[in-house]
Structures are given as structure tokens and as C-alpha cells.
Image: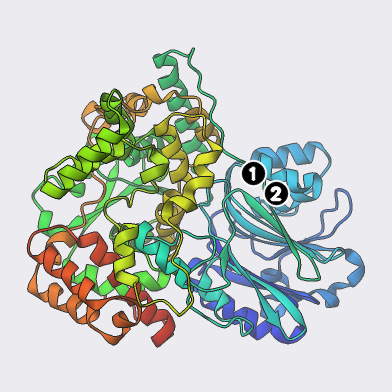
Amino acid sequence: MCGICGFTGATDADLPLLKAMCDVMAHRGPDGEGQYLDSGIALGHRRLSLIDLEGGNQPLVRATGEHASAVTSPALDAAGGYVQGEARGTARGDFAIVFNGEIYNYRDLRAELEADGWAFETNSDTEVLLVGYLAWGEGVLDRLRGMFAFAIWNRSTRELFCARDFFGIKPFYYTVADGAAGPQFIFASEIKCILEHPAYQRELNEDALEQYLCFQFSALDETFFKGIFKLPPAHCLTVRADGSTTMRRYWRPTYHFDEGRSREDTVEAIDAAMRESVRYHNVADVEVGSFLSSGIDSSYMAACLAKENPDIKTFTVGFAEYEGERDEISWARELADELGIENNSKHISEEEYWASLPRVQWHMDEPSADPSAVALYFVDQEAAKKVKAVLSGEGADEFFGGYRIYQTPFANQKLAWAPKGLLRGASKAARALGVRGANYLERASETPEDWYYTNANGVAFSPEERERLRAGKRAEGVARPAAPQELIAPAYAEVAGLDDTTRMQYVDLFFWLVGDILLKTDKMSMAHSLESRVPFLDKQVFEVSATIPTRLKANGEQTKLTLREAAERAIPKDWAQKEKLGFPVPVVNWLRQERYYNQIKEQFTSNLAAQFFNVDELVRLLDEHKAGADRSRKIWIISMFLLWYQIYFIDQKTPEKPAA
């Protein structure tokens, strides 16, 4: 796990700029840094060393030519930590790489390459990735098992090849700005690095704000910073010397249900895939720990890791006000005792939680309204005290049908006999009378693409609520934003022939998972120089999940049906069959306290809030929440945007770290 950055159109005078871009993300890699500066390219790297601790420094440079093995690492062999390409000779035709992530099957790939005659100078997965590119070209992507974002510079063609992993575990941001000598392609692991480059002028992208209100995260390829984009998952990008770019999608998840396989064989396939994935994700030259919550995902994963390493350390956080109840910590401690493994825990106080918010939003780069991001910040902080890498359970819900919302199509089937018009009329009547069930009746009258766009449905703002918030606050002549359903329509179209639950899962892969879950996973772990590895988000695990018929994933009574049965092979049934709770952050209660109510009200009635929103609507939300209605997520969406905007557009400086 590291941080990468770079830009085209570089000159010898750009080393201080490249160094500044690296410095702003020093938290991603405190173990070392390196810069590669050649005529036309600058590549920077911050290293968190986990594989080949001595020889895996970057940027890594390799001579071209079949089976050539001359490798240099600027962090090792050049004064000041950089290599200037011209000083090393222009005839070499070198390739240079900066890479963030892990290639878990790098030993397998290396053996294959060595059998073909390729030689290696290091024991790093970075060199395997680069040599794999030399040997197989872009086809190397099809062979990788891991999480990655990387850029490879070809000195002879003067092209930069960039790629992001299958599910978007690792971030890759980029922009094309007007430099002094023409267009400049600028990229980085974090947006704040790009902001250091003088060719980019920061400007708010209000289109991103519009969609954030409905999704609770940044849902567009273009970020909150106008002109800065995210390379989508499973995409690669080629940048040419003239500034032109070509992007393509190199992999697409597909479903091919195995209806003939027995339930027992399905459970066996899941368990075998997970144990193999955990084994690969445990590959490192440092100790790998694991998160452990009350849920099935981390419990199953930690138990699998304990089979590989009985001395593993696990980490859990909870909230002090729940101490003595069945919170995350009490469940985790009990399971850790059952498995005979170490558990380290921390109760987060409300003072710690609120004090951390500016720092969390700074690390996130874009506003995040997920309250659990702060809990991740603290559990990562605890883990980083003892290990450099941890396993985390992201992806299990999207692969194996874990969200309760995925049960909605089963409930809707009970009303399949009723005319759609009758259901819509009954829904309107129920809503007008304030009777429960209006949403159920409405959804039963529609297809998922009519109403479901992410797990933020029902807790974020509806398009109608968004309009009340934003009406009169948009620049003159700016059209109303697209409905969320328009953004997700292409994803639904790709799986048009599948059942409703699978289609919802597919949409979540490209929106909820990558935009919310994985973003906070990466940014909160790297805030503490910790690598977070996600064994469920393995291409081979997905291939198994993609063969499981929906009836073996979820039904009207339960979620993750066969995953739970597989987990019972590693953990007690009480944990495997436990209901999904999410992470119980007590924001709902806090926002009803006078202290926090007044704090947010001051924020909501500020000139800054009035710049973007109708203040009367904001105050109404606060008062309704204080009176008993749950408006906490909507309040949090607005509050976190205003806090983020204050940090990035007004203060424009790094917030202080909260007291330890």
C-alpha cells in the first residue's frame, strides 16, 4: 500500500513540485519516497513497505529489451531520492512504474515469467507487475489477483499507461490541465496531491453536490473538484505525448448461475474460495492482522486467517455509551476467546468522535456522509499501533446478498397479482393518510430501476427534497440535475435479463461499494499508514458468487444464505446466523442533545450554508429531528459537505490531528 502521483510535460525544474505532491500524502507511505524525473514525465511515490522490505522501493525503472533484467530504484541509488532519466542515458528505452496496492499472486506470475526466461533483481510484486506488462502488454491485467492503481511510463513511445483494479479498491484520480507548454495529464492516489500542481485551479463541481445529496457520496466520475476525475474500476487509460487519452474497460463482472449444483456443493465452493483468498491476502513480509466486529463477514474472515496464523491480532471499536450492552466489542471479545486469538478494542467517546470530523473529511478528499467512516478512522488507528496490514470484510454484502434491501423483491412478489395502477393509488392514499406501508406499495408497483439506486435510498434526500433545498441557489442558466435513476440506468441495462435482486447487487458494485464503502476503507486506513486488505473482493471469490442462484443468496426471511452456512465451518452458528446491524454510530441521539443541536444549527444558518441551500429547509430538518423524527442522515449529509467545503475552499489547510 502506497501513494502515487505524477504528471506529463515535466522539466528538470519540476522536482520541488513533485516532492510537494508526494509530501502532502506522506501518511500513505512513511517508510520511504522516490521521484523519477525525465524529459516529459514526473513520477512520485510514497512507500508503506510490506513486501520485499529492502528491495521494493519505487519508482522502479527497468531497461527494455527481451528478458532484460537491469533494475534501479531511485529511492536507493540516487542522491535526493530521484533519478533524472537523461543522466542515465537516453538509449536504454527504460520503463518506469509507480504502483499502489498489492498483487497477491505475484509469486505465481513470477514463476511463470521466469520459466519464459525473464530475470528479476528484486523480490517485489512491483517488479513482477512491470515485467508482466513487458511480457504480456495490457493482457497482464487479466492475470492479476489483487488491488492496484498504477502508471507505467514508456520512454521510447512517450506514453503513460494507467490502470485501476477490478472493483475500485485502490483510488486513481486524474485531470488534464493547461500547462505552460500544452496539456498536462496529472494523476495521484489522492486529490489533495493534484491540488498542489499549479496547472490545476480548484473549482467546486456543483453537479457532484447535486448527486451527493441523493447518494450521500460522490457518485459521478467527475469529483467535487471540477475537472478532476476518478478512473473507473476495471478501466485502463493510455496517455500520449500530445495530451490525448484513450480509456477502455478491460473486465466486466458477469453472472452465470449454476442451477445444477447442490446447496452443499455451493457451500463447499464458497468456503474453499474464501480460505484460498485469505491465504493469498496473508502474503506479506510483515504481520497481517484482522478487523473483528459482531458481523458474519469479519468473523468468518478472521477465523480463516487464524487457521493460517494462530497468533493473529484482531481489532474492534465501539461506543462508550454502549459499554455493558451487546455492542461490537462484547461480541468480538467473546468470539476471540472462542477462537483463541488476540483482540484489541477501544470505546470511542463522543468528544473523540466530534473532534475527529475535520481530519476525517480532509483525508476523504470529497465529502462523505457515512458516519461509520469515523469509526473506521479509530479502528484503523488502533490497528496501526500493532500491525501494518489488516483484513477487512468489505464486499461480502454485494457478492453474497447481504443487505436487507435485497429482500424487497421477495416481498413485492406477494403483491404480484395486483394491478400496478391499483398499487400506486393505494400508495398515494396511504401516504396522504399517514398510514404505514406507502413505500412498500409504491415499490411493489415499480421495477428496481424506478426506485433503487443505492443503500442511501430512504436516508438521503429524494430528488424532490433536493429541489426544495437547492431551488434558487443554482447559478443562472444551470439546468436541474439528472435524477439518480438516470445515472444508474446504464448499469441496470447491462444486466437487464437477470432477477431484480441480482440487478440491485450489480448496481451496488459500481456505486455504493466503490463510492462509499471502498473509499472510506482506503482513506481511513491510509490516514494511519495502515494497509487494508479485502479478501471478499477477490476476482476468484466473485467468480464463485456469480454462479450462485439468487435463491441460495437471499429470500424473504434471511440474507447471505449459503455464505452463512459456509461460515459455520469456521465460527459458531450464533455468529454465522447473526442479523446484520451495520455499525451502530449514535449520531441519532447526539443530534437531539442541545450541545450538538445548537452546533449544527449555527452551521446551518451561516452565510456559507445560505450560499448553497435554503436555510429554512435546513432548520426544519433539525427541528423535526429534535422533535423525534429521524432526519439524522440528511442532517449529516449537509453538515459534512459544509465542513468539507470550509476545509478545502475557505481554510485551504490541513486540519490539526485530534488529541490521541
Residue that label 2 marks:
128
Q: Distance between the residues labelled 2 and 1?
A: 6 Å
Q: Choose between 247 and 295: the one closer to the eye.
A: 247
Q: Position of residue 74 (x, y in %)?
A: 71, 70
Q: Along the line of sight, which residue is nearer the eye, 34 or 310? A: 34
Q: Do the residues labelled 2 and 1 touch (CB within 8 Å)?
A: yes
Q: Quadrant of residue 397?
A: top left
Q: Residue at left 73%, top 76%?
A: 183
Residue tagged 1: 106
Q: Is residue 609 above or below residue 488?
A: below
Amino acid residing under circle 1: Tyr
- Residue drawn at (39%, 43%) of the image: 450
Give the left or right position of residue 229, taking residue 137 as reference: left
Disc on the earlier residue, 2 or 1 = 1
| 640 in relation to 386, above or below | below
- The residue depicted at 72 percent of the width and 44 percent of the height is 140
Give the percent coordinates (x, y) of residue 362.
40, 73
| Circle 2: element type | helix
Q: Is residue 388 visible?
A: no
Q: Position of residue 534 (x, y in %)?
A: 45, 46
Badge 2: how crowded within 10 Å, few (<14), some, or many (20+)? Answer: many
Q: In which quarter of the image is residue 69?
A: bottom right
Q: Which residue is drawn at 67% across and 40% down?
A: 143
Q: Identify the coloring.
A: rainbow
